[in-house]
Every structure is written in structure tokens, then in C-alpha cells.
Image (cartoon, rainbow, N blue to C red):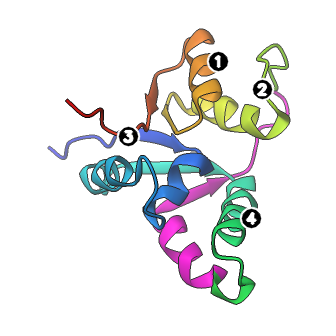
Amino acid sequence: MTPSKSVFVVDASAAVKIVFDEPGHAEYVAWRETHKDDLLLAPVLFFSETGRAIEKHVGDRRNIPTYHADVLADIQLEAPDRTTWDLSIPLTFYDAQYVQLARRTGATLVTADERMAREARAAGLDVLEIKPAQSP
């Protein structure tokens, strides 16, 4: 019998850490390696959000496709279900799409955004918050 895959919704704030050496980079890279066979999802806006984050980091727009390929690798983009918006969660419209996708699919939300993590937990979701390791 084949073991079932875990399902995760990956937020842009976590995903861009795969290409930039910034706080949380090592933790996200290790997590991604551990979960390379699992199902990784993101709402379609992930493509634009990660592209913009890369643009802010590198400045030269011609380099975006090179970095973007690494960020997008193995992440399946999903269209939002327009019938299940929960506007009671106090997040931006963009961030709420990640929370809604995690809720709809029963996935764990992976984020480096403290506020999104806090609100998703308050809404009853499982959350993996990508944080830099604490020094002893």
C-alpha cells in the first residue's frame, strides 16, 4: 500500500525563502526537502505575489524567471472557490485566499507571515510557521 500524501498550502511569504538567503531560508529549504513528495498547493495569485517579491529582491526584472522557476517548482496552483469566502477572518483579500484554500482542502497552511499564522490558527486551521531557528 502506498502511503498517502500530506497536503499543504504554501504562502508566498514562505515560498520565496527558497531562493533568498534571509531569515527562515534554511528552515524552509529543509521543510521543502522533507515534503518533496507531498501535495503542495497555492491559490493562483501565488504566481503574481511571488513574482513581485522576487522583483523587489533582485531589482532587475530580467532575472525574475530564473528565480521564479525555483519558487514555483512542485507547487500546484488552484483557482479559488468563489462560493466559500469567509470574510470574518481579519486578513487581506489576498491572504484570505490562502486560508480559504487550506480550509477547503483540509491542508496545513505553511507561512512566514506571523499575522496570517495567528489568524489561521484562530480559525481552527493547522499552521506551520516558518521561522528562523532560535540561537541557544
Could you tell whether 136 is left or right of 55 in the image?
left
Residue of label 1: 119
Q: Secondary structure at mark 2?
A: loop
- Please determine whether, in this image, residue 124 is positioned above or below residue 98: above
x and y percentages locating residue 126 in the rendered image = 46, 22
For marks 2 and 3, the one nearer the N-term is 2
Q: Which residue is mark 4?
A: 52
Mark toward the start of the polypeptide (1 vs 3)? 1
What's drawn in magenta, residue-wise? 64-84
Residue type at mark 2? Leu
Q: Earlier in the sequence, mark 3 or mark 4?
A: 4
Q: Which residue lies under the disc numbered 3?
A: 132
Mark 4–mark 1 distance (CA, rounded to whole Å): 24 Å
Going from N to C along the chain, the mark reached first, 2 or 1, is: 2
Residue 127 x, y percent position in the rendering: 47, 26
- Name which residue type carries label 1: Glu
Coordinates of residue 3 in the picture (x, y in percent): 20, 42
For this rendering, which residue is in front, 26 or 107? 26
What's the residue type where badge 3 is placed?
Answer: Pro
Mark 2–mark 1 Cα distance, whole angstroms, equals 8 Å
Residue receiving disc 2: 91
Instruction: Check disc 4 and give the amino acid type.
Output: Arg
Q: Residues within 10 Å of mark 3 (few under 14, many from 20)?
A: some
Residue 12: percent from left, percent from top: 61, 51
